[in-house]
Image (cartoon, rainbow, N blue to C red):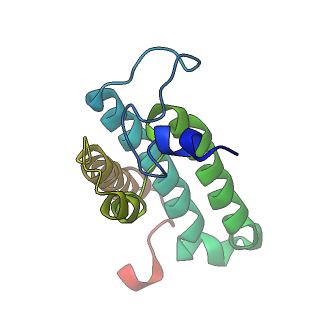
C-alpha cells in the first residue's frame, strides 16, 4: 500500500478532521468530536462498571464469565462509531503516544477532556443511579 495514504490521514494520530475526506461527508468540528468522545467513553465505562461489579459477579456466574466479551463488544461498537468522526480515542493514553511521536497536537484537547468527561459521567451515573438498587452495594462498602 502506498505510504502517502497513511500520511494523508495523520499517520495514526487522532484528529478531528484527519479522517475526513470526500467519501465520509461533511467535516466534523472539535465540539462535535468532543461530544462523540464523551458518549463513546460513557458507553464503554458503563459496560465495564456493569460487568466488573463484585456484588453482581458473585451472585451470577454468567456475568463474570461473559464480562470480557461484553467489554470487547463495547470497544468494538465505540470504534465503529468514532473512527469515522475522529479516529476513536476513548483513552487519553491512546491519543498521547501517537501525537507525541508525530508532534501533532491540533485539537488534542478533545482526546483528553472528552474521555475524562465521559468517564466522570459514567462514574456518577454508576454511583447514583445503580447504587440505589437493593443488593447492588459492593461487599467492601458495607
Q: Where is residue 66 in the image (x, y as percent from the top left)?
A: 74, 66
Q: Position of residue 105 (x, y in %)?
A: 25, 50
Q: Where is residue 138 in the image (x, y as percent from the top left)?
A: 45, 76
In the displayed structure, does residue 69 sit left or right of residue 94? right
Front residue of this view, candidates 19 and 59: 19
Q: Residue at x 31, y 37 (%)?
A: 34
- Asked if one can make out residue 9 in the rendered structure from this viewpoint, the answer is no
Q: Which quadrant holds the C terminus? A: bottom left
Front residue of this view, candidates 130 and 16: 16
When asked about the image quadrant of residue 6, the answer is top right
Vertical placement of residue 129 versus 50, above or below: above
Q: Residue at x 27, y 29 (%)?
A: 31
Q: Which residue is drawn at 47% across and 56% down?
A: 45
Q: Residue at x 42, y 35 (%)?
A: 18
Vertical placement of residue 71 versus 41, above or below: below
Q: Position of residue 49 (x, y in %)?
A: 49, 62
- Asked if one can make out residue 106 in the rendered structure from this viewpoint, the answer is yes
How many marks overall? 0
Amino acid at each position: 500500500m502506498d505510504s502517502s495514504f497513511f500520511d494523508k490521514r495523520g499517520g495514526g494520530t487522532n484528529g478531528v478532521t484527519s479522517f475526513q475526506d470526500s467519501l465520509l461527508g461533511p467535516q466534523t468540528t472539535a465540539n462535535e468530536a468532543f461530544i462523540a468522545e464523551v458518549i463513546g467513553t460513557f458507553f464503554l465505562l458503563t459496560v465495564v462498571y456493569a460487568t466488573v461489579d463484585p456484588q453482581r459477579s458473585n451472585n451470577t456466574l454468567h456475568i463474570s464469565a461473559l464480562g470480557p466479551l461484553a467489554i470487547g463488544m463495547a470497544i468494538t461498537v465505540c470504534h465503529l462509531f468514532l473512527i469515522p468522526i475522529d479516529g476513536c480515542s476513548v483513552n487519553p493514553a491512546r491519543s498521547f503516544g501517537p501525537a507525541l511521536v508525530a508532534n501533532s497536537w491540533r485539537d488534542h484537547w478533545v482526546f483528553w477532556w472528552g474521555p475524562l468527561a465521559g468517564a466522570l459521567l459514567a462514574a456518577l451515573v454508576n454511583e447514583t443511579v445503580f447504587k440505589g438498587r437493593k443488593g447492588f452495594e459492593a461487599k467492601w462498602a458495607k
